[in-house]
């Protein structure tokens, strides 16, 4: 099944996801410009990114159900159209209200892409190469962040808001054309997976996916690994480096490419590790989270402005969170039959983005509260001071900490099921893992 056509489909899907990531992260380099264009507080600015992620996260499960029923190509077509419409709206938006509406369209379109391509990979490839391709696909997609951080940022600086977002719109339109011309759901002649024939059966399939501890384990893995890096690169990292640390805007934008480079190195390594050691995947997730937490603690506790090398280290560590979050989808693949993978992947993908938009919003609120308190004490307004960022960023430890507790609890339930080889309708890898579990006396 791993034919030349399969690799072409993989390339097309990766480009479409690259375009989606560019649309998603385009606001990250435009945070300062958005403040100047629309005005408002930190909470108002965060709302532009937060509503996008709320729509994205809320759409994941419905999109997963739709993928199971209609196939990934239909959802990719709808997603690219919505992103074109959203970026066009944002390009010409005269007010924050229309800008929010544009970002909601972008979030809805973006929501359809990632899990659709994940489903394409499992339809066009098989065997141990699947988790490795998932990592490569994720890394290629993150190059979209490079496009927003370098050429898009340059266009924004040189030509202004509208030309920059029109350029992003053009990339989204090219992705739409690629889906129309080149993407197909499955290889010609291969048997179609049974699809739900009614909404009732689709919702029943979703309920089964939600009830599997392996799906829940994927959700919490995604929750704890992806969120911190998303918050930093999508919104608050750029103002933190420009205002809190005093970096030039061009340098701060360029530094947002560091997590992408780090992810491209970590991704293939994690792909090999998860393929070779499927019984140790949750340990890998917890290791990634521990390193991120330790690095953040050093940055926030540094007595003066953190040195440049430490910020670079932080960006490198955050870059490992993206590939780490893809392990969650490997859990979904392991513990669900292929016909319900869309629903399962949708559940998993909610995790990281749920944590992200909660963090984003709370950081904005904490920044505003500190600035209001400072002014009430007779001080000068300094919304984006380094000390304000130090305090606001600590909210990550609370949110991720909750996720770690839930991950450990869900892992115990998954281990019990593996040791007893329980489950009604599971993927073939479940059987293999159950056998290994019984031989070794340990598991996920």
Image (spheres, helix red, strand yellow):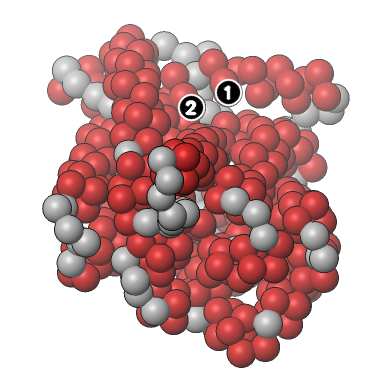
| Residue displayed at 64% across by 40% down | 54
Q: Residue 398 in the image: x percent, y percent? A: 35, 29
Label 1 with label 2: CB-CB less than 8 Å:
yes
As displayed, is residue 72 above or below residue 138? above
Q: CA distance from mark 1 to mark 2?
A: 6 Å
What is the crowding at mark 1: few (fewer than 14 residues within 10 Å), some, or many (at least 20)? many
Left/right placement of residue 390 relative to residue 373 reads left
Residue 160 x %, y %: 68, 82
Give the position of the N terminus as an image quadrant: bottom right
Q: Is residue 424 above or below residue 270?
A: above
Q: Earlier in the sequence, mark 1 or mark 2?
A: 1
For the point 45% across and 62% down, which residue is it? Answer: 239
Image-based side of 334 in relation to 39, left or right: left
Residue 239 seen anywhere in this rendered image of the structure:
yes
The quarter holding residue 310 reads bottom left
Q: Is residue 122 above or below residue 341?
A: below
Picture quarter with the C terminus: top left
Residue named by callout 2: 215
Q: Residue drawn at (85%, 25%), measured in percent from left and top?
A: 198
Of the numbered discs in the image, which one, if any, rests on residue 209? 1
Q: Measuring 62% from the left and 63% from the top, which residue is drawn there?
A: 35
């Amino acid at each position: 099944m791993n034919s030349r056509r399969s690799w072409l489909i993989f390339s097309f899907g990766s480009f479409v996801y690259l375009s989606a990531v560019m649309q998603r992260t385009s606001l990250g380099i435009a945070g300062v410009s958005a403040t100047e264009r629309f005005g408002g507080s930190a909470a108002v600015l965060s709302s532009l990114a937060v509503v996008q992620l709320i729509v994205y996260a809320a759409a994941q499960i419905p999109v997963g159900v739709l993928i199971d029923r209609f196939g990934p190509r239909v959802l990719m077509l709808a997603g690219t159209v919505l992103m074109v419409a959203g970026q066009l709206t944002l390009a010409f938006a005269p007010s924050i209200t229309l800008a929010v509406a544009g970002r909601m369209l972008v979030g809805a379109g973006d929501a359809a892409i990632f899990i659709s391509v994940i489903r394409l990979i499992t339809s066009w490839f098989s065997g141990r190469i699947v988790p490795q391709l998932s990592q490569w696909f994720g890394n290629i997609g993150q190059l979209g962040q490079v496009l927003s951080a370098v050429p898009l940022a340059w266009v924004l600086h040189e030509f202004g808001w509208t030309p920059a977002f029109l350029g992003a719109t053009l990339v989204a339109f090219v992705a739409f054309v690629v889906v129309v011309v080149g993407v197909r759901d499955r290889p010609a002649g291969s048997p179609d997976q049974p699809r739900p024939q009614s909404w009732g059966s689709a919702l029943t399939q979703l309920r089964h996916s939600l009830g599997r501890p392996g799906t829940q384990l994927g959700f919490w893995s995604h929750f704890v690994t992806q969120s911190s890096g998303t918050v930093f690169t999508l919104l608050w990292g750029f103002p933190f480096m420009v205002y809190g640390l005093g970096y030039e805007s061009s340098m701060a934008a360029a530094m947002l490419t560091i997590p992408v480079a780090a992810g491209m190195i970590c991704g293939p390594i994690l792909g090999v590790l998860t393929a070779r050691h499927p019984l140790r995947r949750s340990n890998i997730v917890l290791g990634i989270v521990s390193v991120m937490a330790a690095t953040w603690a050093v940055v926030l506790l540094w007595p003066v402005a953190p040195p440049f090398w430490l910020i670079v280290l932080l960006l490198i560590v955050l870059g490992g969170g993206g590939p780490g979050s893809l392990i969650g989808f490997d859990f979904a693949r392991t513990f669900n039959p292929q016909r319900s993978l869309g629903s399962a992947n949708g559940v998993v993908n909610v995790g990281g983005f749920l944590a992200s938009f909660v963090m984003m919003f709370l950081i904005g609120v904490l920044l505003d509260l500190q600035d209001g308190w400072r002014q009430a004490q007779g001080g000068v307004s300094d919304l984006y001071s380094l000390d304000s960022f130090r305090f606001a960023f600590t909210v990550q430890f609370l949110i991720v900490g909750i996720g770690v507790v839930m991950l450990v609890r869900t892992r115990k339930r998954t281990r019990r099921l593996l040791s007893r080889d329980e489950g009604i309708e599971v993927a073939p890898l479940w059987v293999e893992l159950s056998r290994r579990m019984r031989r070794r006396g340990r598991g996920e």
